[in-house]
Amino acid sequence: MLKSMRRHAKYFYVLFVVIIISFIFWGVGGVGNGKGGRNVATVGGTKISVTQYWAAYQRAEDSVRDAVGDKFDDKMKQALKMKVLGNLVVNEMLYHAAHSEGITVTDNELRAAITSEPAFRQGGGFSRSTYLQVLRMNRITPEQYESSLRKELLAEKMRRMIEDPIELSPAELASIPKGSEQTAGTIKNAILEMKRQRALVSFLEGLKDRMKVTENPGLIS
């Protein structure tokens, strides 16, 4: 078993990296107009402020620390800073693309996302009083949260439209090393995720030809 794990260790590492880079980070209240502060990025005229960036970064760091513990070092922190910035920009680009394509999020879809959120559940089901209490504790109004969530869902719809049709070819499936079903499944998922990421990057590169995107990473170094 240990020999098998060592043989495929690089694939497990690849999968972990893929999971990390696939995080989606949204600033509380969504991306705004950046009034009263400096902006870390601008996407099609929409500004992402420093305040929104650091709110998203803190949530990302908390998640990664929970996953890797003491392994979270300065090198990983710097990489995460840039990844958060990149994902904020990507999500804004996907939102603009979805909006231009006429894609929408229905009230039922929004309601389903809210009621399925574990933080808002109590006694095995959704609790509106818990929902409102959690938002109050985070100084967010229901209107702000729901507007941000609707935007997030819209960007995610666009992402799924790009990534979901991507599958592994027969040759790629045949190239997966033989081993346990669990190991083979892990490797397959890692390769598929990387292939879908490449499709997403290609789509975003095309968007940049039509959408003005600027970043100011010096503000977060």
Image (cartoon, rainbow, N blue to C red):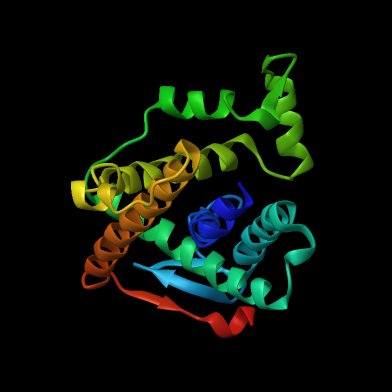
- Image-quadrant location for residue 104: top left
Q: Where is 124 relative to 159, above or below?
A: above
Q: Is residue 132 above or below residue 125?
A: below
Indicate left or right for 183 with 212 as reference.
right
195 w.r.t. 150: above or below: below
Q: Is residue 211 visible?
A: yes
Q: Which quarter of the picture shows residue 139?
A: top right
Relative depth, front residue between 139 and 23? 23
Residue appearing at x 68%, y 52% in the figure: 63
Considering depth in this image, is 85 or 13 the residue closer to the camera? 13
Q: Is residue 152 above or below residue 21?
A: above
Residue nearest the observer in this picture, 153 or 138:
153
Instruction: Give the mark count.
Output: 0
The percent position of residue 76, horizontal first and vertical second, equals 65, 72
Q: Which residue is drawn at the image coordinates 26% and 52% (left, top)?
A: 172
What is the quadrant of the C terminus in the image? bottom right
Q: Is 150 on the left or on the right of 80, as rendered?
A: left
Look at 49% across and 62% down and name the residue there.
88
